[in-house]
Amino acid sequence: MCGMPQPPPVRSTTTRPSRPDASMSLLTNVMDHSLDDGYAEAAARKAGGPGGMPRTVRAKLGLAAGLVLAALVVTVGAAQARIAAPTVAKERQELIDRIQRETAAADKLEATVDKLRDDVSARQRAALKSDGGDDDLVGILSGAVAVHGPGVKLVVNDAKEATTGGGGNPRETSGFSDTGRVRDRDMQRVVNGLWESGAEAIAINGQRLTALSAIRAAGDAILVDNRPLVPPYTVLAVGDGQRLSTRFQNSADGLYLHALQQNYGIRTGISTEADVRLPAAPSVIVRTAQQSTGKGTS
């Protein structure tokens, strides 16, 4: 038997069919599983699928309780807003009515003041006529009536770059510490200089000056008859324009103003005007002086 030849092994001739894309197995796997399982589950939960709903009874009850609480809060807020709306509207209307009443009362008082002022002026004129006085001249000199005529316009303003002066500076001893600021005493000297130079009527920033007017300082502000003024300070004076301008600039007060301009940068400018208009003083009240009944002294 050992010498007998062995027949060759029989091989099956049948083969399993292969896929056409068997050579691209990696690419096929990527195409078939393009989305990871975790991403697919999250997408299904976001879309409201079965995976996004609470699964346990306890979770479902918690979700229902949260929805009921949110609805209750919204309902209560809407009810409170509806209840409070009429109250707010009523308070607003009451405030509007109060403002209108107070405004009407203020207008009525202002009309009463104007009426009383006219009555006082009429009585003053009547008293002057009975005594043989010239009421027009007295009104002009006292500042009780508006005037116009030739004169000068003097503008005084703070320095462009005001600086704080050093110790011992005379302009720092009282009031302002800024040497480039116009002071109340500066305006006093300007006004006095214009009176001495022949001015017949003067106003500062529209505020008419009288024999009872006062120029003072309150903090950093300049007051004229207790009314604050802001720079630039425009001084209008009625008089012989050219003569008034020349006399003022050559006077001691005019030279003082020029020194302020040279030493502290205070800006000034004066010009003659063909016609300047000054308003009447707001009130001319005499508390102490009385008309003399005598005809003179012997």
Image (cartoon, rainbow, N blue to C red):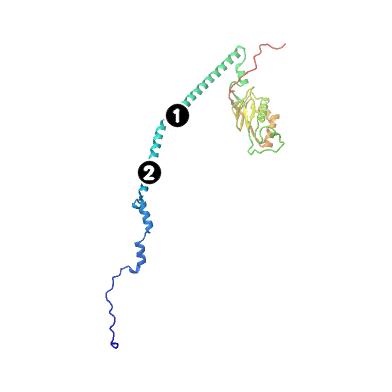
Mark 1: amino acid: Glu
In the rendered structure, which disc, 1 or 2, sits on the residue that comes first in sequence? 2
Q: Can residue 112 be seen by looking at this rendering?
A: yes
Please report the residue visible at 37 percent of the width from the left and 42 percent of the height from the top: 68
**Residue 272 appears in view:** no
Give neighbour class at mark 1: few <14, some 14-19, many 20+ (Cα, 10 Å): few
Q: Report x, y in % for residue 143.
A: 61, 22
Which part of the image, by quadrant, shows the N terminus?
A: bottom left
Say whether residue 19 is left or right of residue 224.
left
The residue depicted at 33 percent of the width and 52 percent of the height is 50
Side of 200 where 60 appears, left or right: left
Q: Quadrant of the C terminus?
A: top right
CA gap, disc 1 to disc 2?
A: 39 Å
- Image disc number at residue 65: 2
Q: x, y percentage for residue 132?
A: 62, 12
Horizontally, residue 93 falls left or right of residue 282, namely: left
Q: Secondary structure at mark 2?
A: helix
Amino acid bearing label 2: Ala
Of residues 50 and 24, the one drawn nearer to the viewer in this rendering: 50
